[in-house]
Amino acid sequence: MRVYERAGEEMRSTIRYCNYCKIYTMKEKCRICGKETIIKKPPKFSPQDRYGKYRRYLKKMERGLI
Ligand SMILES: [Zn+2]
């Protein structure tokens, strides 16, 4: 099933964001408005996502990139 493969890929790699609905998603298209989402790197205003930021930061450190 192509749908499941794609979902798995996106889940591993990126957090996306819909500028129109102001929500985070893993999909390329927003599940609410259907517009294309953008890849969101470091959100300053979402406490929820700070954990993701730290996780990514720690991952990089583990791999010796920082
Ligand atoms: Zn949307």
Image (cartoon, rainbow, N blue to C red):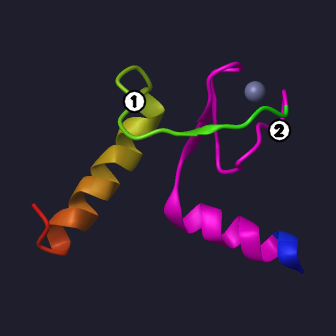
Q: Which corner quadrant holds the N terminus?
A: bottom right
Question: Residue at left 51%, top 63%?
Answer: 13
Residue type, numbered disc 1 = Pro
Question: Residue at left 14%, top 67%?
Answer: 65
Left or right: where 12 falls relative to 37: left
Asked whether mark 2 lies closer than 8 Å to ligand 1, one says: yes
* Segment colored magenta: 4-33
Residue 39, how many percent across, how many down? 52, 43
Asked if residue 9 is among those painted magenta in the image, a careful observer would answer: yes
Q: Which residue, given by chain and number where applicable, does mark 1 sit on?
A: 43
Residue type, numbered disc 2 = Arg
Left or right: where 50 falls relative to 62: right
Residue 44, how many percent across, how many down? 34, 24
Residue sticking out furthest to the bottom: 1
Question: Residue at left 39%, top 30%?
Answer: 43
Q: Which corner quadrant holds the C terminus?
A: bottom left
Residue 49, picture quadrant: top left
Residue 17, how many percent across, how many down? 59, 35
Calculate the distance from the C-alpha at mark 1 to the C-alpha at mark 2: 20 Å
Q: Which residue, given by chain and number where applicable, does mark 2 sit on?
A: 31
Task: Indicate the secondary structure of the residue bearing disc 2.
Answer: loop
Neighbour tally class for label 1: few under 14, some 14-19, many 20 plus, Cα within 10 Å: few
Asked if residue 36 is among those painted magenta in the image, a careful observer would answer: no
Question: Residue at left 61%, top 62%?
Answer: 11
Residue 2, picture quadrant: bottom right
Regarding ligand 1, which quadrant of the image does it lie in? top right
